[in-house]
């Protein structure tokens, strides 16, 4: 039992439990054709990661199920503009207007940002999948990735209008 352990041991035990709970998710996603692997996330919590042509996937243990996040960036929204000053001005305008456009177009489970490295729109979708619905995880991820790319395209369209 974790509760009776000292702080550091309790944290290590919790991490071991999370990693053990995610191993079957790795296998489930690999069977579905995803290149899934266990890795520590930015907050040192274990997660299952998948890198696909349609976007990136992170699966963590959530409060009431598996927290699934799909995210990606769309590089070079204004790269076709050869005038560097004009391109920089358009990127600045997009960076400023993106939060308002996102509020109008996106659901509360979606987070949009301007990616400075890729010079384009980034988007993250989140969904909690109940533990009892793990068998549907690959289908849920497939649907979320399709929605991710549709929503990135909608955001980009509005930013260039």
Image (tube, rainbow, N blue to C red):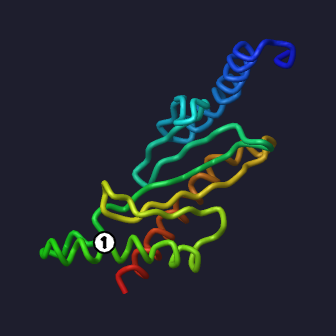
> As drawn, which residue projects farthest toward the bottom?
161
Q: Is residue 15 above or below residue 5?
A: below
Looking at this view, is 118 or 22 the one in front?
118
Left or right of 151? Residue 20 is right
Query: Which residue: 52% across, 38% down?
Result: 49
Q: Is residue 138 above or below residue 74?
A: above
Percent position of residue 45, x then y: 61, 31
**Residue 159 picture quarter:** bottom left
Percent position of residue 43, x then y: 57, 35
Left or right of 156? Residue 33 is right
**Residue 147 picture quarter:** bottom right
Left or right of 118? Residue 45 is right
Quadrant where the N terminus sits is top right
Query: Which residue: 54% across, 29% down?
Result: 40
Q: What kind of element bears circle 1? A: helix
Query: Which residue: 56% across, 62% down?
Result: 111
Quadrant where the C terminus sits is bottom left
Percent position of residue 6, x then y: 78, 12
- Mark 1 closeness class: few <14, some 14–19, many ≥20 residues within 10 Å: many
Count the labels in the image: 1
Q: Is residue 65 above or below residue 20?
A: below
Looking at this view, is 14 or 47 the one in front?
14
Reading the image, the residue beneath label 1 is 91
Looking at this view, is 90 or 33 the one in front?
90
**Residue 140 picture quarter:** bottom right
């Amino acid at each position: 039992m974790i509760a009776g352990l000292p702080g550091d041991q309790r944290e290590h035990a919790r991490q071991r439990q999370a990693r053990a709970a995610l191993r079957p998710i790795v296998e489930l996603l690999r069977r579905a054709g995803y290149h899934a692997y266990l890795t520590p996330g930015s907050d040192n919590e274990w997660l299952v990661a998948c890198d696909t042509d349609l976007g990136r996937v992170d699966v963590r243990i959530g409060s009431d199920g598996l927290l699934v996040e799909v995210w990606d960036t769309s590089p070079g929204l204004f790269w076709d503009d050869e005038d560097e000053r004009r391109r920089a001005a358009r990127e600045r305008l997009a960076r400023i207007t993106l939060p308002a456009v996102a509020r109008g177009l996106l659901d509360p489970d979606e987070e949009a940002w301007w990616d400075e490295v890729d010079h384009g729109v980034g988007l993250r979708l989140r969904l909690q999948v109940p533990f009892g619905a793990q068998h549907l995880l690959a289908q849920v991820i497939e649907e979320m990735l399709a929605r991710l790319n549709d929503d990135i395209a909608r955001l980009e369209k509005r930013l260039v209008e």
